[in-house]
Image (cartoon, coloured by chain):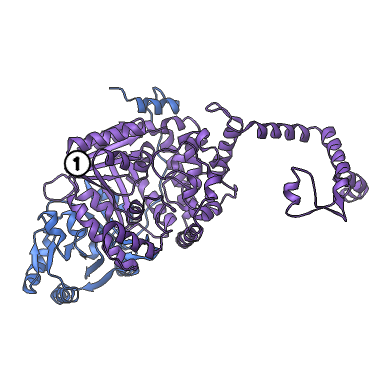
Chain colours: A blue, B purple
Amino acid sequence: MKNPILENVRRSLEKEGDPSLPQRPAIFPSRKLESSEQEIDNFINEVKALSGSTQKLKPEDVTVALQTLVVENRINKAAMWKTPSIHELGVEQCLKKLGVEIVSPTANKYELSTCDLGITEADAILPETGTLVLSSSNEMPRAVSLLPRIHLAIVRPEILRADLHEVFAEAKQRNYLVLITGPSRTADIELTVTLGVHGPKELHVWMMV
Amino acid sequence: MSGAAPKYIGFEAYTERIPSGIPKAVQQATGRFAGGRALRVSELPQWEQLRQIASDIRMHTIRNMDVYLSRLEESVRAAGGHVHWAGTAEDARQIVLKIAREHNVKLAVKAKSMATEEIDLNHALETAGVETLETDLGEYIIQLDGTGPSHIIVPAVHKTKEEIAALFHEKLGIDAPPDPNELTRIARETLRQKFLDADMGISGANFLVAETGTLVMVSNEGNGRMVTTLPDLHVAVAGIDKVVPDWESLTVFLKLLARSATGQKLSTYTQFITGPRQTENEFGPKEFHLVLLDNGRSEILKDPIGRQVFKCIRCGACANTCPVYQNVGGFAYGWFISGPIGAIFAPQMLGTPTARELPFASTLCGACAEVCPVKIPIPEILRHLRRRVAQGDETINTTMPFYIRAAAKIGATVLSREWMYGSGTTILHFFMRFFTHHNQISNAPYPFSRWTKVRPLPAFASGFRKWFRKQKDFFKETVE
């Protein structure tokens, strides 16, 4: 069936019958990653500048860090991604011991909305902007990083990427991707920046070193 | 005010009716964002190169829009999404209404989308019995308020926190203290329930990637994510000019967009949505519909100068830097799109009879062209549109009142014939002597009285050409 809008576009561009497509202009080349330590620090500084809370942790420190997080923020309910790393760190058991109710990440949206804490990993992190790159799947549902008021992302140096060129090259065939750069914010009321409008109010990033 | 296409935009008249608090509020916003932008630009030594590359990619896309739109449609369908083509605003409204009816939609939540304002979608949905809520905090506030946006990025910046608290009290029945954090918390809680209950999420698109059929959406608040993640149905409305070739080109636009708009390095959330959800438990819509809107764009593509307006990535930097916009804000532009980009978009979309004042709503200072991340030559397009208004062209007859055309013709005739100019000025000098007292002209006849009423003119000396002829010998010496 003919498409009158496309026909009109072709006519306006004087391209009737010409399906050829010249090469798209070239793009700026990628930047190169600096040393791992430098990039980790770059990333951490950017997240801090966005009012995110970050720390470098060894796996054995996770239990204490979780305890502090739960107590300071009065966490009653939490949901987390079902990934191998989160499983190995023993996050679920630790939280249960602290008396936190664990909600399945695939629970319905009303239940997930009552969670105080959502724990995820990331597919990639970008040091220039302090950005987390998250994809989506049955084990890594989108709502876990969106609905709870605190989002905790556990990341590793191996997922550092130089810039968006690299991220896109790896991820463009995915059906969903979100770049998270800091907690939810607005300046709509008298230009005063307030956090936690609809998305998480707090973003915590733990760098496992 | 934003919404149904206006019959006539009386820019000059509107500027005289702007409430007194507007210019100050707008200037605080524009100052903040322009300052933020300047800082970010200074951080990137390759800024000018990026602008040029972005401009080239956008022009390439415009010139080949038919091929990219075809690809986009294929890719979206391959990803399991539905594509609808809307020739006019009414077509688009009917398409969305049909989708809403078929899915028995009672409640719809909207992320900020200029395309939906262009087609006045909210009104159509409400009339059809669908409760339609704006969820962007600024848009939510002005929706409750029933007024229009004063600024593109922060539409409610003209409202004080006291006014917003009163508004929440009146419209939501909630006792709200005039504190931005508390007001934000109230909005969060009130809208949270709506997000969860909504049958349909409506959004626009910042970019549509032809390569994979991906919809790119940026937001800071998270409402964009809510609207496209929680309801089972997602409908996106976007102009055909939003298409971009591929993911690689996005790397350039995303580097420029947030920095130009608010001075952030990146917006808080940037989503890349390709079709409906693929698995049962990951959240996201079961059905994805993309409505591609023409509404006059395919006609504008005929004009090689005017079609550069489609390079726009909606950052708002032009408005933040414009001396006119800084003093009048969004209200005066009479339609959903304001500032310098509005002044070149509206006359082309609505036609010059409706929007003929807008190309003149500018001092042609060129500040906008300097900050535009995709190098749209806004002053050039403004002059092109002014010519269209004054003289007409292939698309339109002139709409200038006859007395201005007559005066312009007389002026052009006199200035191009030396004997006319010479004798004209001599006659003028002769008559002006009658109005010159004490070396001043303070009481000239109409139309010069419009000047001398306020400030006297100095008396005319002898004519410049006469004076120059006397200096001839002096100049002869220095030249030789």
Residue shown at the point (38%, 40%) measured from the top left? B118
B153 or B211, which lies in front?
B153
B122 or B387, which lies in front?
B122
The local secondary structure at tag 1 comes to loop
Mark 1 is surrounded, within 10 Å at the Cα level, by few (under 14), some (14 to 19) or many (20 or more) other residues, namely: some
Q: Badge 1 is on which residue?
A: B105
The count of marks equals 1
Residue B150, percent across and down? 44, 53
Quarter of the rendering occupied by the N terminus of chain B:
top left
Horizontal arrangement in the rendering, residue A11 relative to residue A178 (left or right): right
Residue A98, percent across and down? 9, 74
Q: Chain of mark 1?
A: B
Residue B109, percent across and down? 25, 48
> Image quadrant of residue B189?
bottom left
- Using the rendered image of the protein, determine whether residue B9 is visible from the camera's viewpoint: yes
Residue A106, percent across and down? 10, 55
Horizontal arrangement in the rendering, residue B324 relative to residue A132 (left or right): right
Residue shown at the point (28%, 55%) measured from the top left? A179
B17 or A37, which lies in front?
B17
Horizontal arrangement in the rendering, residue B355 relative to residue B199 (left or right): right
Residue shown at the point (80%, 50%) measured from the top left? B443
B68 or B4, which lies in front?
B4
Rendered position, B18 above or below B115:
below
- Using the rendered image of the protein, determine whether residue B213 is visible from the camera's viewpoint: no
The amino acid beneath tag 1 is Val
